[in-house]
Image (cartoon, coloured by chain):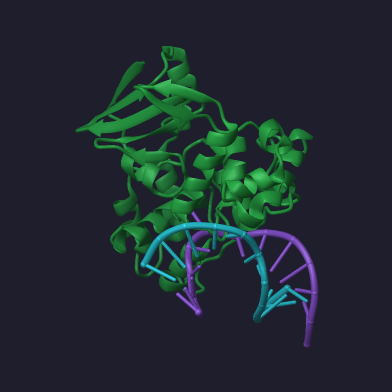
Chain colours: A green, B purple, C cyan
DNA sequence: CCCCAGGCGGTTG
DNA sequence: CAACCGCCTGGG
């Protein structure tokens, strides 16, 4: 086990970051969020102005700085991002300022590419508790177990394990009609047609069209993968929530094709703002 | 019982 | 190309 402390980090609230719907394997546990990160448990909490990050495995300072910090997106400058967002998202009612205030501290995680690919395929026409349940079932069935504090946890399944399994086993995990979409994604992935290394070097439109070749990945799921794992902050996933938010606060005044460099972050702010207001 | 949930693919006019 | 429709499944 390792522990790291960070001080004077502006614009980072672990609770908001892990509660804004971008990840499915973290849960609130008394004083912070913890969950499976690769092959270990990661716990992040905030005590006054100090961020405390614990890992179940022993990790080096290098690993922390080169892997954990980028994962938490702490190397990104959110003053700069927020300034750009305001230029494109301000309106007569100034809703973006309220959203930025309520949502301040949300960061866009750099999540594992394959895990994000599969998780957001599962997310379609589905709700968050059930998405989490399905991912947990898949991990228990196809992931690798590891123990921590006397409890068993499971890594996210490998592409090979999901590709080679019987499709009926995916059904048993609750995937429903998305089972063949998962198979399709694994096939493309293992053929190297949608690799992270390729996508990270492409522009946004190429990233979209490449991912949308996969049966079961449409525009919204592709945008989520691009935003939450490839970390192209130009991606702007439009789900039913965001569609409602835009209609409610912007009407037709927002030009979807001209939203600056960080609309993905603005999307998170608006989404969280609207859900927070609902009292969740 | 019906309805919906962070969509998508397929069909129809 | 816009508008529908069915879809696994579990919860309200």
Whether residue A130 is visible here, answered yes or no, is yes
Q: Is residue A272 above or below residue A182?
A: below
Q: Position of residue A93 (x, y in %)?
A: 35, 69
Instruction: Give the residue at x 32% y 47%.
Output: A104
Instruction: Give the residue at x 41% y 55%.
Output: A86
Q: Nearer the viewer, residue A104 or A3?
A: A3
**What is the quadrant of the C terminus of chain A in the image?**
bottom left
Q: Is residue A122 above or below residue A78?
A: below
Q: Nearer the viewer, residue A220 or A155?
A: A155
Q: Nearer the viewer, residue A178 or A237?
A: A178
Q: Position of residue A125 (x, y in %)?
A: 56, 61
Whether residue A13 is visible here, answered yes or no, is no
**What is the quadrant of the N terminus of chain A in the image?**
top left
Q: Quadrant of residue A169?
A: top right
In the picture, measured across the screen, residue A136 lies left or right of residue A32, that is: right
Query: Extreme left residue here?
Result: A48
Q: Is residue A143 above or below residue A20?
A: above
Q: Position of residue A198 (x, y in %)?
A: 72, 34
In the picture, measured across the screen, residue B13 lies left or right of residue A58, that is: right
Q: Quadrant of residue B10?
A: bottom right
Q: Is residue C6 above or below residue A52?
A: below
Instruction: Give the residue at x 58% y 38%.
Output: A115
Instruction: Give the residue at x 30% y 53%.
Output: A102
Count of labels shown? 0
In the picture, measured across the screen, residue A274 lies left or right of residue A108, that is: left
């Amino acid at each position: 086990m390792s522990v790291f402390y960070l001080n004077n980090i502006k614009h980072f609230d672990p609770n908001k970051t892990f509660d804004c719907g971008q990840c499915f394997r973290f849960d609130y546990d008394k004083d912070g969020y913890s969950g499976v990160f690769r092959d270990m448990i990661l716990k992040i909490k905030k005590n006054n102005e100090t961020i405390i990050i614990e890992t179940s495995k022993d990790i080096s300072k290098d690993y922390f700085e080169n892997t954990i910090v980028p994962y938490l997106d702490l190397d990104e400058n959110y003053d700069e991002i927020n300034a750009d967002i305001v230029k494109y998202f301000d309106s007569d009612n100034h809703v973006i300022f309220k959203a930025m205030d309520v949502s301040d501290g949300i960061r866009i995680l750099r999540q594992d590419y394959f895990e994000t690919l599969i998780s957001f395929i599962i997310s379609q026409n589905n709700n968050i508790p059930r998405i989490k349940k399905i991912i947990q079932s898949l991990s228990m069935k196809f992931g690798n177990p590891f123990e921590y504090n006397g409890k068993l946890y499971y890594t996210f399944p490998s592409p090979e394990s999901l590709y080679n399994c019987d499709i009926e086993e995916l059904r048993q995990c609750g995937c429903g009609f998305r089972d063949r979409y998962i198979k399709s994604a694994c096939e493309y992935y293992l053929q190297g047609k949608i690799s992270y290394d390729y996508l990270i070097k492409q522009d946004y439109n190429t990233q979209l069209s490449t991912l949308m070749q996969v049966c079961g990945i449409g525009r919204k799921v592709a945008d989520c993968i691009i935003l939450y794992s490839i970390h192209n902050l130009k991606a702007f996933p439009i789900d039913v929530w965001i569609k409602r938010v835009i209609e409610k606060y912007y009407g037709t005044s927002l030009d979807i094709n001209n939203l600056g460099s960080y609309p993905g972050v603005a999307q998170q702010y608006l989404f969280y703002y609207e859900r927070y207001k609902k009292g969740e």
